[in-house]
Image (cartoon, helix red, strand yellow):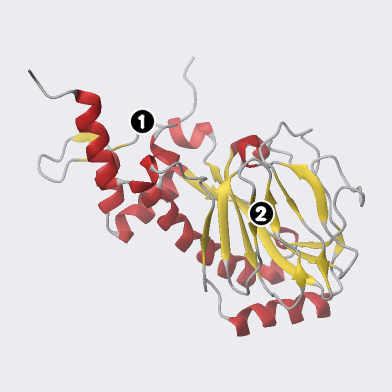
């Protein structure tokens, strides 16, 4: 009798991607993507800038839902260096994330690359992505994903927080904050915690029943959809500073070209 396909395939997957067999929650935390001095410099620059405005959700400003002070870095060209720094840190985590969960990019898209032997275009297999060298993986990820706008956020001690259970993937109103409807293109959310000199202030995921305790320089990555509904708990005894954004799919015209008539 021939070997049962499902058994052999599951055994192979268990070797290649243990996460696929161990009921992962798809929440990943990577330490030390920024050093403490860099984080402190961003905090000092935030406070000296006087640019912060009331933080908004997809529906606008409502401090009962989100009580924060934000600087949208994309609105301020002088902060381009900080945006580049944070995107570089997030991208280093993104590479690690897709090596662990290759179907984050393979399942939605039929990605093809030249076969290293024949040179012909072939579908990218998960095991090839997992073992891909950094430079080639960088190219692939930049072809299919793009960085979102970055918010630097300050949550005042014993007052600020984001207590509303929310997700990051939703239909926008195509207002000034999301004129291109980018919220529907979000694949992953990410946050970099800039300090930890306070109590509580965790990022709490509802369905996974998981609390992520902020640690200076740590990067959090998770899916943007409702499956990873979350909230930001109130920090006690000290202000909390974070940088937040998303990894988005490239728009359809960039992925597939202009539609033909």
Q: Furthest residue to the front?
A: 1
Residue matched to label 2: 149
Looking at the picture, how far across and down is residue 126, in whole percent?
30, 41
Quadrant in which the N terminus appears? top left
Q: Furthest residue to the left?
A: 1
Towards the viewer: 79 or 108: 108
Look at 80% across and 43% down and name the residue there: 176
105 relative to 109, above or below: below
Looking at the picture, how far across and down is residue 217, in whole percent?
59, 73
The first of marks 2 and 1 along the sequence is 1
Residue matched to label 1: 110
| Residue 113 visible, this angle | no
Looking at the picture, how far across and down is residue 101, in whole percent?
41, 45
Question: Separation of disc 2 and disc 1 at Cα?
Answer: 26 Å
In the picture, measured across the screen, residue 43 lies left or right of residue 88, that is: right
In the picture, measured across the screen, residue 218 lies left or right of residue 178, that is: left
In the picture, measured across the screen, residue 41 lies left or right of residue 34, that is: right
Q: Residues within 10 Å of mark 2 (few under 14, many from 20)?
A: some
């Amino acid at each position: 009798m021939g070997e049962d396909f499902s058994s052999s395939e599951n055994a192979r997957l268990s070797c290649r991607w243990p996460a696929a067999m161990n009921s992962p929650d798809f929440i990943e935390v990577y330490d030390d993507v920024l050093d403490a001095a860099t984080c402190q410099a961003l905090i000092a620059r935030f406070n000296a800038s006087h640019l912060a405005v009331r933080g908004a959700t997809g529906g606008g400003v409502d401090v009962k839902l989100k009580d924060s002070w934000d600087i949208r870095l994309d609105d301020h060209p002088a902060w381009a260096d900080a945006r580049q720094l944070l995107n570089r840190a997030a991208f280093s985590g993104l590479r690690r994330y897709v090596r662990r969960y290759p179907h984050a990019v393979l399942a939605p898209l039929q990605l093809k690359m030249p076969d290293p032997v024949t040179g012909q275009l072939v579908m990218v297999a998960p095991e090839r992505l997992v073992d891909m060298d950094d430079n080639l993986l960088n190219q692939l990820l930049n072809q299919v994903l793009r960085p979102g706008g970055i918010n630097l956020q300050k949550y005042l001690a014993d007052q600020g927080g984001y207590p509303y259970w929310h997700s990051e993937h939703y239909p926008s109103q195509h207002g000034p904050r999301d004129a291109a409807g980018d919220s529907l293109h979000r694949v992953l959310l990410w946050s970099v915690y800039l300090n930890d000199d306070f109590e509580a202030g965790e990022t709490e995921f509802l369905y996974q029943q998981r609390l992520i305790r902020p640690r200076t320089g740590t990067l959090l990555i998770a899916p943007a959809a409702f499956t990873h509904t979350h909230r930001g708990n109130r920090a006690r005894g000290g202000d909390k500073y974070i940088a937040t954004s998303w990894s988005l799919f490239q728009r359809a015209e960039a992925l597939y070209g202009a539609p033909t008539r």
